[in-house]
Image (cartoon, rainbow, N blue to C red):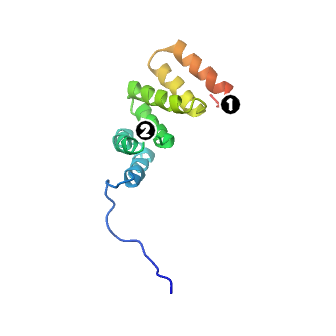
């Protein structure tokens, strides 16, 4: 005989050992354009899973869209330290540097992104 489990109706909380609930809630906030709220939740997930580059990239995107440009640039540089071939992180870093008024640094990142095949 096989046991069948059904989903519980318990409310979603923002706590969990693996950060999956925080991540789901952060995605919801990001898609709703509540970027500051998304970033706040994603920081918790990144603290629990620092090697997870997809979570870090969503954090960087949230920071960029909420105009926390210095923090976005720092997060993007951490991503590129772990994976220099992450072309979207390089593109977003270039765009972040542009918004910060650093055109020379931005140009270098955007050229690398274009060379990697990322559309500008």
Q: What element carries label 2?
A: helix
Q: Quadrant of the C terminus?
A: top right
Residue 16, above or below 34: below
Q: Position of residue 115 (x, y in %)?
A: 68, 25
Per the image, label 1 sits on a secondary structure element best described as: loop
The label shown at residue 73 is: none
**Disc 2: which residue:** 59
Which percent across, then down, holds residue 38? 38, 43
60 up-or-down from 14: above or below: above
Residue at the spot x=45%, y=34% of the render?
Answer: 60
Q: Earlier in the sequence, mark 1 or mark 2?
A: 2
The label on residue 117 is: 1
Is 111 in front, or is 49?
A: 49
Q: Is residue 45 above or below residue 110?
A: below
- 92, 84: nearer the viewer: 84
Instruction: Give residue 104's quadrant in the image.
Output: top right
Count the labels in the image.
Answer: 2
Which residue is rendered at x = 50% and y = 32% of the image? 79
Where residue 86 appears, x then y in whole percent?
Answer: 58, 33
| Rendering quarter of residue 13 | bottom left
């Amino acid at each position: 005989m096989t046991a069948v489990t059904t989903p519980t109706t318990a409310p979603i909380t923002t706590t969990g050992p693996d950060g999956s609930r925080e991540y789901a809630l952060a995605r919801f906030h990001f898609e709703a354009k509540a970027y500051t709220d998304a970033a706040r939740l994603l920081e918790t997930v990144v603290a629990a899973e620092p090697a997870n580059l997809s979570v870090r990239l969503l954090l960087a995107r949230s920071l960029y869209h909420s105009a926390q440009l210095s923090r976005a640039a720092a997060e993007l540089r951490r991503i590129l330290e772990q994976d220099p071939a992450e072309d979207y992180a390089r593109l977003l870093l270039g765009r972040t540097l542009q918004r910060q008024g650093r055109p020379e640094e931005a140009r270098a990142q955007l050229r690398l992104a274009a060379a990697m095949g990322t559309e500008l």
